[in-house]
Amino acid sequence: MTGAAGAVAGMAGAVAVAGDAAARAGRAPGLPGPAGARDVARRELRGMWLATVANTDWPSRPGLSAAAQRDELAARLDEAVERRLNAVFLQVRPTADALWPSPYEPWAACLTGTQGKDPGWDPLGTAVREAHDRGLELHAWFNPYRVANHTDPGRLAASHPARRNPGWVVPYGGRLYYNPGLPEVRAFVQDAMLDAVRRYDVDAVHWDDYFYPYPVAGQDFADGAAYAAHGADFPDRAAWRRDNTDRLVRETAERLAALKPGVRFGISPFGVWRNAATDPAGSPTRAGVQTYDDLYADTRGWIRNGWIDYVVPQLYWHIGNAAADYAALVPWWSETVRGTGVDLFIGEALYKCGDPAQPEAWQDPAELSRHLDFAARYDQVRGHVYFSAKSVAADRIGAMDRLVADHYRSRTRPPGGVR
């Protein structure tokens, strides 16, 4: 998503067996089928990611006045309402900095252009209030471990925890990351994120797909000292790394439940847990990245253990993609959440629609509408989230217009939502 969406864009291959996008017999447009006592047919999540890292979606550029930033934010929220969406996933901690007056981390650089500089207003507090006034849920989107999109600690604010604790930081692939293998890092990033929950009436804590970073050919993530200090009980470094990520998820879930039980916890992973060729429990895919093996993130395990309330796999491939077919992954994720109580929302690659660099399927304005047709066959799918807000607004080839006309004819509330 710039992070996530940008990083996953080329990781699975070209064209293969086309998924069947036949309409659902006897169902209202855009609504899932019967699901017993659940209210699936009347409630579904319709969300968009609002990315702030590198000013992806908002603010349009750093250094705008407080009034201009507020106006732009309001316009993004209004666009969500106009598209009959009901949730906004606002990136509030893009690079180990904050969109609120945090006692743990400096003000985000995307606001003023200078990390640590007070923007003169409270973006997160304003976003929560303005979203709720419009009947939108506000999911606070955090990135746990990314520190910077460069490798120079000297460019960070002087007060930045990564400068005060240089041993916490690992340079890798042209970026700086906190080391997930250090218990003090895990405790700190939880404290920093949960401060926002303590202060504001957010509806959810939301993470994207960055845990250990995406692999970079020819480079090693330099956590050998942490492994030597903390990895003795594990058969190999990969198992230790997965346990580190598991601990972050489990501990955050426990602390969030104790702090504010009504706030949900959701994660948006890369769309392939493992390929079936690697693990018989995996999906019928041939993706170049597997979260379990490459990002040390056991997304399937988190669901089965009940550590998260919802999952939003980034299924950023067209129906018929040879390596990772949307029509193969939706059924796999549906079976993965079945009976667990974890809600399944599908992450959708609106940003690919009309991009001339993408395959032919993404030049068709109806592709995303077909995704919703297909997903509606599966009662476990309780909504969709679109990357990202600027694509919702720009709608390059009318794909969002088509989707809204076909599926979002009236507004609805999200599952479990009270707004």
Image (cartoon, rainbow, N blue to C red):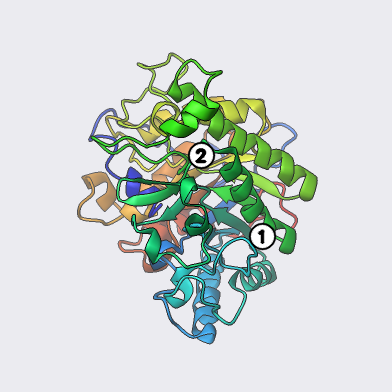
Look at the image and tell me whether residue 343 can be seen.
no
Q: Residue at x 48, y 28 (%)?
A: 227
**Residue 131 x/y as whole percent:** 63, 68
Looking at the picture, tell me which residue is in the foreground, 224 or 386. 224
Disc marking residue 196:
1
Q: Are marks 1 and 2 in contact (CB under 8 Å)?
A: no
Mark 2 is surrounded, within 10 Å at the Cα level, by few (under 14), some (14 to 19) or many (20 or more) other residues, namely: many
Marks 1 and 2: which is nearer the front? 2
**Residue 12 x/y as whole percent:** 29, 35
Mark 1 is surrounded, within 10 Å at the Cα level, by few (under 14), some (14 to 19) or many (20 or more) other residues, namely: many
Q: Residue at x 53, y 48 (%)?
A: 144
Q: Give the structural element (helix, strand or loop) at label 2.
A: loop
Specify whether 288 is left or right of 380.
left
Measured in 3D between alpha carbons, the distance from the residue under mark 1 to the one under mark 2, in whole angstroms, is 21 Å
**Residue 90 x/y as whole percent:** 54, 61
Specify whether 209 is left or right of 321.
right
Quadrant in which the C terminus is drawn? bottom right
User: With respect to residue 289, does 129 lie above or below?
Assistant: below
Q: Residue at x 47, y 46 (%)?
A: 167
Report the amino acid beneath label 1: Ala
Report the amino acid beneath label 2: Pro
Q: Residue at x 33, y 36 (%)?
A: 215
**Residue 269 x/y as whole percent:** 48, 39
Looking at the picture, tell me which residue is in the foreground, 344 or 112. 112
Look at the image and tell me whether residue 414 can be seen.
yes
Looking at the picture, tell me which residue is in the foreground, 210 or 134. 210
Q: Give the structural element (helix, strand or loop) at label 1.
A: helix
Residue, disc 2: 180
Which numbered disc, 1 or 2, marks the residue that appears first in the sequence? 2
